[in-house]
Image: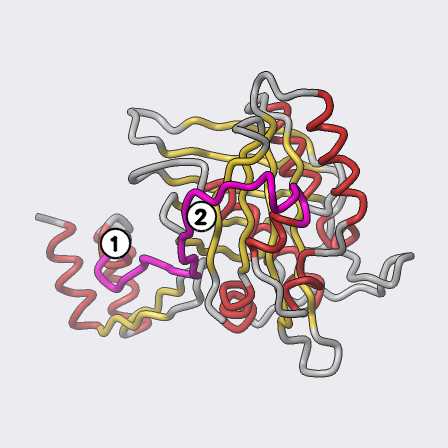
Amino acid sequence: MTDYLVKALAFNGEIRAMAARTTQTVTEAQERHDTWRAATAALGRTLTGSLLLGAMHKNEEKLTVKVQGDGPLGAIVVDADSKGNVKGYVQNPEVNLAPNALGKIDVRGAVGTNGTFSVVKDLGLKEAITGQVPIVSGEIAEDFTYYLANSEQVPSAVGLSVLVDNQKDDCVKAAGGFMIQVMPGASEETLVEIEKRLADIPQVSTLLDQGETPEFILGRLLGEENVEILETTPVQFFCDCSKERFASAIITLGEAELTQMIEEDEGAEAVCHFCGEKYQYSAKELTELRDEAIK
């Protein structure tokens, strides 16, 4: 089943909501970066949350989410846009910890509970807009929720979940999430109803693994009769890196460093942090880039 995201309104516009299935997206990230269990769960949650956050925007707007905790994972960095594209990586992908007290993957222990959660938005203006809050839990979903409430002043509930298969090389069985946002003027009755439903819903990844859809999840969260689906968008892991883009970066190294690479290494390899793609440059190609650098 393909990944997609659903946008909806509920309770006559009092609530804005989104839900997404991201199983294939997270699987591709896991395979590209060869992440271990805890890293897969943390990166998968951040990819899913960033997709939901990106879907709040429009046109060519983009954002970068960075989770910099004090746990063994190091930094998690994810780029997302408003069109359902996302890419990301974790600094230390080979992290796996003992299960937490609930028998679940210890994402909090892997991420850490001290550090920063930041979002940099490129809205097509002269300068990017940055919002930063402290990490409040390290479980990722709560950190997205805290960011939205404190940096964007939007009361929200965020649920993010990655189900990793213990039996099959720790592959991703299911992944997804939801984001519910309270609009100004929402009634107390609506909030009480949603809180009650939030307390009762199983993990998103469990529902998706059982074959349920993002639409079904919104129905469980908000009541089918209250939900108005607005649009559905495909989502995917997509990296826009290319050999040409890396070449532009290599040129900026300058004549001396390029000469050293040509004479000592007889070539160069560039590796994209976001997707792991490798690009080879021969001595001849580097010479051409050096010639361009000294023009």
Rendered image quadrant of residue 113: top right
> What's the CA distance linking mark 1 and mark 2?
33 Å
Earlier sequence position, callout 1 versus callout 2: 2
Identity of the residue drawn at 63% across and 38% down: 144
Q: Position of residue 195 (x, y in %)?
A: 76, 35
> Could you tell me which secondary element the residue under label 2 belongs to?
strand
Magenta-span inclusion, residue 231: yes
Q: Is residue 54 above or below residue 162?
A: above
- Tell me if mark 2 has few (under 14), some (14-19) or many (20+) residues whose alpha carbon lies within 10 angstroms of its own: many
Q: Position of residue 159 (x, y in %)?
A: 67, 47
| Stretch in magenta | 220-245
Q: Residue furthest bottom?
A: 168
- Tell me if mark 1 has few (under 14), some (14-19) or many (20+) residues whose alpha carbon lies within 10 angstroms of its own: few
**Colouring style:** secondary structure
Identity of the residue drawn at 49% across and 55% down: 88
Q: Amino acid at mark 2?
A: Asp
Q: Nearer the viewer, residue 174 or 62?
A: 174
Q: Position of residue 37 (x, y in %)?
A: 70, 68
Query: Which of the numbered marks, if any, corresponds to residue 116?
Result: none
Identity of the residue drawn at 40% across and 58% down: 234
Q: Position of residue 85 (x, y in %)?
A: 40, 54
Rendered image quadrant of residue 240: bottom left
Q: Amino acid at mark 1?
A: Ala
Identity of the residue drawn at 23% across and 61% down: 259
Q: Nearer the viewer, residue 38 or 4?
A: 4
Q: Is residue 295 left or right of residue 44?
A: left
Query: Which of the numbered marks, if any, corresponds to residue 79?
Result: 2
Query: Which of the numbered marks, if any, corresponds to residue 256?
Result: 1
Rendered image quadrant of residue 35: bottom right
